[in-house]
Image: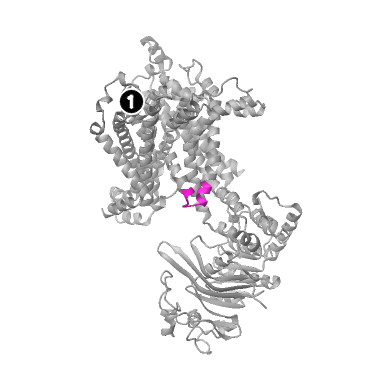
Amino acid sequence: MRLLVFALRRAAWFLPTVLGVIVLTFAISHVIPADPAALLAGETASPEQIARVRAEHGLDRPAPEQFVRYLGRVLRGDLGRSLYTSREIRDDLVRRLPATLELTLAAMAVTVVLGVPIGVLSALRRNTLLDHLVRGATIGGLAIAAFWMGIMLQLLFSMQLGWTPLGGRISGAPPRPITTLYVLDALLTADWPALRRALLHLVLPALTLGIPAMATVVRFTRAGVLDVVSSAHVLYQRAMGLPPAVVVWKYVLRSAATSTITQLGLIFGVLLAGSVVVETVFDWPGLGLWAVNSMVMSDYNAIMAFTLWAAVVYIAVNFLVDVLQVLVDPRESAT
Amino acid sequence: MTDLLSVRGLRLRFESEQGPVEVLDGVNLSIGRGQVVGLVGESGCGKTTLARAILGILPGSARVLAGEIVFDGTDLLGVGVDRLNDEIRGRRITFVPQDPFASLHPLFAIGAQIGELLKWKSPRGPARPRPLALLRAYPRARRRADHQAVLDLLRVVQIPDPEAILRKYPHQVSGGQRQRLMIAMALLPQPDLIIADEPTTALDATIQAQILLLLRRLVREHGVSVLFTTHDLGTAHEICDKIVVMYAGQEMEEAPADRFFRAPRHPYTRKLLESLPTPGGPIRDIPGEIPRLIDPPPGCRFHPRCPSAADDCRRARPEVTTAGEGHRLRCYHPAGDASPTRTLA
Amino acid sequence: MTELAYALRRIAADRLALTGALIILALALCALLAPYLAPYPEDVREVHPGARLLAPSRAHLLGTDRMGGDILSRLLFGARITIVIAVIAVGASIVVGVPAGLVAGYLRGWLGDAVMRVADVFLAVPQIVLAIAIAQTLGPSLPNVILALSVTYWPWFARIVYAETRSAMSETFIEATRGLGASPRRTVLLHILPNVASPIIVRASLGMGFTILTAASLGFLGLGAEPHSPEWGRTIAESRSYLPDAWWYAMAPGLAIFLVVMGFNLLGDGLRDVLDPRLRRAGASR
């Protein structure tokens, strides 16, 4: 019950930010440009077409009135029509979402499953060779341009070694759609050839997207564990002879997990931003690639819709993370 | 009767950035079966270090240079870490920490943490749990028996409604209750020795008295030995059978409690007792400062502040001399048998 | 001044931070002296179709690109673009963000909250996405990209300054100075700003690295640099069509980016350790 109240309060806190983002996209698309109608109509539009767009969108009306119309359209889900696919933009968003979702989830898995244990071990073996290597790797990991790393991985594994395909989400027929996530669907339908194909396509993009984020997770987990390891409760557990493995992997990790969850929102933002370039490098048919293609065509509505979508998703994830925090730390709900 | 625990000539050093720090300089300590020994001294005298050395939970920068810690016939310094962890810690020697709040994990329920302790350290369990610690299941029958033992002991330490408290988290429980929990946890494995590191320092005065009385009663009932470190002589007086005084990493005097307070012989002990405040009386402290152990005074480390100091005190540390039944001290110039100017009656 | 000297000495003592500082110095020198250091400075503009896609050799240490231009020379000139973008973008972010944070933290009340909520709005959109949107609106030129980067990075400074200002405001010594009648401007400049300086410097160094990565990503996507510009991200984009044969074409600019960002990160971490041990946490990646 308390959780529900907290969730509602947090949601209320986030709503103005969502509204603010809508205002921002409105400002970028309707207020800042010299001639928004020309932009909306597209590069190849004739003067008559531009005039028509102007009238249609009410771009000759005063700004506040335009904003209300814009807000209304956004809330109805009418985001315009894509110049790139000629479909309704909201349909495009829905169609391309699963690919991006699968990539982001896979990258998140890489980040957490690899990053957390490495962070823990690095903290436990502080100032040893392993620790120094890990710390060096994280500093390096944060300095590598994701798109470049993707290209280098492609160069090695796809071109030189031929182990993985160059791009795309799958070659051949995708598995029967249940969740629209290929790997999951292949598992659920026991379609092993499709699973193999899907995984081969997924592995390089997921690594490319996940490794820079992993550097952050390793650093935070390491710091979190270092904090805990010198604490009184760890000392007590050691004094009472609890098996070291239990102390570390059950109790210390639990404390470190709390700080990792705090970072999940930030990490998600990193992944979201990274998906734009990673999808471009690997020709991954998700929303990032859609946005880039729309950008090339100067498809204004699409870019604005993508911006709005990205912000709303980021806000929603942070909201969920806040709620998760309360679940995870019993002390939080006491405040 | 042989001592349960016998520390002999323990020399311990911490490696710090400024250089080696000689924290313990050939310390002797003995604890008999069923005996409550108070380890008394000012902050930084090494009493906590000694307590942790017995348990083997010193920081990584600690080096044992010499000495032995013989527990029931075995030198703990020579035992492998695994055996020490499995067989001694939490089983035969348990620990009551100074800060009961910070010593419980904040994110797990109290019952879960006590259960975890008993999963590995229950007297009804196997002597050596190994290998694959994480995957071991907790046998149901034993779990039930352990749970019952927990409830019984919680009632004995006067915690009302034990079932409810097991479901709570550490931050939801008061300071006094937390310390009772720690005492209960120290007793559950049915140890031979409990090491209590300033267990009442963090508590309010009124609660302190309650906890001390409880501890004394339980110790008598269970026949457990206790090593009780404290900087407060009054506390030591409440429950200790024997008191050992430490100063700057050296033990100075050791005596049965009543002799200790009635007729101490070591100048430092006498100064300590004299410095206890009396109503309406003057404030007497010991002039000078506690030495920095990175560059300690040679010989007897108290000599710079000692009224009876002479040249021999500086040259070499005094050997152990006996001043009566169970009364040992290390001093070249102990005070006479006369009582000090102030006693603790 | 002695505090600055002390800080500099400590940075010199920390080998990692020193390495970072040296790398950045090297970058600055390369950018500044590009016309003199580059073996073929004319290759920034000229094309040599006969020398296309040559592998690294003594004549061309890093090989040539699709126009026959010497990659090493073009990289050196690309360093100029990189520095200009990073310095202006981060500088503008500081110029906007620090005062915003100071004002918001000092004034408190609804105005302070409002400024921070605006900052939150900008932080909600991933930087690269917002940069794309702004570049689309205003046109994909280099100045617009710099503008877009500044617009998206100022909230980081605003937040830090806001937090520090608020905590400084609750310090008793601030109450004392205000009680003595110090004007708000004096209070802020003399008492609050020095405390805030360290986190700003650390964030600026890390921000340079992050901005360079984002700018390179934008260049890779075709935003910011004109065709045939030696900008590093754009060069990588161009190189893709010639893989795997002309591997040096893609590898060199990427390594340059890596080295430079690494330099800023090392320096930023070192600065953090030196200037404020309180901040010595894992640190954000941005």
Is residue C119 left or right of A330 when viewed as pictured?
left
Does residue B257 sit above or below B178 in this rendering?
A: below
Q: Position of residue C278 (x, y in %)?
A: 41, 52
Majority SS type along the magenta span: helix
Does residue A212 sit above or below C178 in this rendering?
A: above
Q: Where is residue B23 in the image (x, y as percent from the top left)?
A: 48, 69
Foreground residue among A326 and A170: A170
**Residue A300 in magenta?**
no
Point out the residue furthest to the right here.
B141
User: Alpha-carbon neighbours of circle 1 within 10 Å: few (<14), some, or many (≥20)?
Assistant: many
Residue displayed at 63% across by 25% down:
A193
Which residues, given as a range, are shown in magenta? A119-131
Point out the residue furthest to the left here.
C36
The residue singled out by tag 1 in the image is: C64
Three-letter code, disc 1? Thr
Q: What element carries label 1?
A: loop
Does residue A122 sit above or below A296 in this rendering?
A: below
- Dividing the image into 4 quarters, which one contains the N terminus of chain B? bottom right
Chain letter belonging to callout 1: C
Residue displayed at 37% across by 16% down:
A38
